[in-house]
Amino acid sequence: MSDERTATRRGRPRTQLGESKSLASPVVALDRGIRILTILANEGSATLAEIAKSTDIPAATAHRIVATLEARGMVSQDLVSGKWRVGPQAFRIGSAFEEGSNLLEVAPPLMRRLSKETGETANLAVEQGNELIYLIQVESENPIRASIKNGTSAYFHTSGVGKAIMAYMTRSKLVDLLGTFSLVRQTDNSITEAEKLLIELENIHSRGWALDDEERFLGMRCIAAPVFDSLGNVIAGVSISGPISRFPDDKLETLATAVQNAAASMSENLKTSQA
């Protein structure tokens, strides 16, 4: 899905002598886990025996699956009744879907207003599976403008939205994310040293907005700000981008204020929609 990164796809491992050639086992295990979660969601709670009966999964197998789900926070057990119920991590995943769905409803009108106010192209991107994915773009009417296809992925460290999102991640999430990619140099302005990137992220967090200063494409600048869900977690970045001639140093603060206002409105609307 990326126009800037080429993923290395791993082929299937060869079946060793004596091993089953069936590829269904991992899928069956996943399907059983989902069936258990569905039963708990529908019933509210259930004992292990009830889970096994409702799903037609052998009790011993159901116990192993439930134990795995519990270790991941997907289910939890009432020590008094012995019944299992959906856990906090499953709730968090469900909430993330709801927040994301609302984001796609909340963002477009505010992005159109931002683009009209600044005369520049507005972008919205999210972190998804350790990738930066552009979801929406509202193009400027200017003949010279940035154009990014929806669904395109990009590097976090060379984009305004990517840096805005990273700057507001938890420390553990940021460390995990930085371990998944190299600091590739796309232009001479790209930050390729981890220490410099961390200092940049601290500065972004302090002032509330990020700048891609010709770090991804020469001649182009981008100003971005973070968008938060109803729990205060960063879930997206909104930005405006265009040629450096329309983003001079003495205009950056003014443009940044417009972007921050749009991001704040998105965050507030998400909070309201979840109330």
Image (tube, helix red, strand yellow):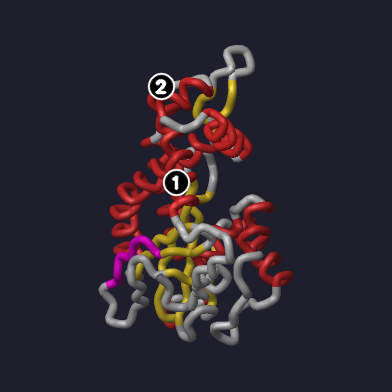
Secondary structure character of the magenta stretch overall: strand
The extreme top residue here reads 80
Considering only vertical position in the picture, is 67 above or below 82? Answer: below
Q: Position of residue 207 (x, y in %)?
A: 60, 58
How far apart are the two marked residues, 2 and 1, measured between alpha carbons? 22 Å
Query: Which residue is depicted at the point 46% across and 21% down?
Result: 50
- Seen at 48% across and 61% down, the residue is 21
Which label belongs to residue 43? 2
Residue 60 percent across, percent down from the top left: 57, 31
Is residue 136 inside the magenta stretch?
Answer: yes
When asked about the image quadrant of residue 133, the answer is bottom left
SS type, badge 2? helix
The answer to which of 201 and 94 lies nearer the viewer is: 94
Q: Nearer the viewer, residue 187 or 101?
A: 101
SS for dot 1: helix
Mark 2 burial class by Cα count in 10 Å: few <14, some 14-19, many 20+: few
**Was residue 150 drawn as part of the magenta stretch in this picture?**
no
Residue 268 location (% of width, % of height): 43, 42
Question: Is 180 positioned to the left or the right of 218 in the image?
Answer: right
Q: Say if mark 2 contacts mark 1, CB within 8 Å.
A: no
Q: Quadrant of the N terminus?
A: bottom left
Graded by Cα atoms within 10 Å as few (under 14), some (14 to 19) or many (20 or more), the crowding at tag 1 reads few
Residue 129 located left or right of residue 175: left
Q: Nearer the viewer, residue 83 or 20?
A: 20
Q: Which residues are magenta?
A: 134-140
For residue 108, side relative to residue 78 (left or right): left
